[in-house]
Amino acid sequence: MPLDFIKKLIDLLAMQKMNRLHLHLTDSQGWRFESKKYPKLMEIGAYRKGTPLNTTYDYDSRPGDSLYGGYYTQEQLKDLVKYAADRFITIIPEIEMPAHSKSALASYPELACLDSTGKPFAYPEQIQDEYCTEDETFEFLDNILSEVMDVFPSPYIHIAGDEASKVNWKTCPLCQKRMKEEGLKTGEELQSYFIRRIEKFVNSKGRNIIGWDEILEGGLAPNATVMSWTGIEGGITAAQQKHNVIMTPGEYCYFDHYQTNAPGEPVAIGGLTTLTKTYSYDPVPAGLTNDEAKYILGAQGNLW
Ligand code: ACM
């Protein structure tokens, strides 16, 4: 989205007395954060061919050759941080890992898994969504997160953790070696190792991580805040484990759903989430004790 759009969004958030803007800066389809250290992220990762027009996830109907993309410079983002702070809003940056990372892997294929014979996967068709769990990945992500933390003073850094298929981890010799060395039995435990290792780095810089609710699966990182999106259960479990929680269940809080049944609604991901339904949402799940309910920091709306 153009910066002017984000500034308008910030104005509207301030008008509604909202105090955080979570910016999803990277995904498989595009890398939007300028890195001084890794220029290929802007040369390769920030652009892709084809844009779905008037379709909903209808990838086959993309116009083939139109190049789409762009990224924000660090200077632009610093300006945005100030613009938001002047309106009492903290911007929380998100860098996706271990999955939703094809834009980074297209730029630096050496960070992707190897096939079961130890060879690189064919590029780009077979490149998966997840980073390999080799040391080089952590070096890369630590460097990226350092750059991110230099731009965003937010006490929270979102490190995602959602929707990792972990398919390649099961056959990649480097990931298998990692599992053996660390005594990890499942892909979920390997993901947990990944997130804990990143958390340690982020904590060492005096910041805390937020992750989507899948970070619960192999055991929660010690200081993580959980963002509950697949439903409310992740939020309940995390609060019961005395972890902070932000509630954003898809059914109420995803604004990329259809918002009315009226003809002419802009293309949406599907579903129907009306203003009435969203407004009816109480972020504190029933059934939590008063003590547990204190871990629910608030709610968030998502627009993808
Ligand atoms: C998400 O919508 N994958 C967090």
Image: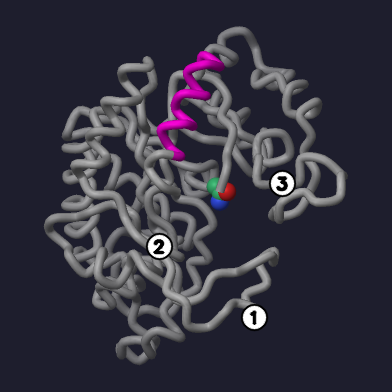
Q: Is residue 30 left or right of residue 250?
A: left
Q: Earlier in the sequence, mark 1 or mark 3?
A: 1
Quadrant position of residue 128: bottom left
Q: Position of residue 256 (x, y in %)?
A: 65, 46
| Extreme residue toward the left, this view | 37
**What residue is pinned by disc 3?**
257
Q: Disc number at residue 30?
A: 2
Amino acid type shown at disc 2: Gly
Residue 295 lies, with reference to residue 124, above or below; the image says: above
Q: How crowded is mark 1: few (under 14 residues within 10 Å), some or many (20 or more)?
A: few
Chain part drawn in magenta: 5-17
Q: Residues within 10 Å of mark 3 (few under 14, many from 20)?
A: many
Q: Which of marks 1 and 2 is nearer the N terminus?
A: 2
Q: Is residue 8 magenta?
A: yes
Nearer-the-camera pick, 213 or 39: 39
Give the Cα distance between marks 1 and 3. 21 Å
Total marks drawn? 3
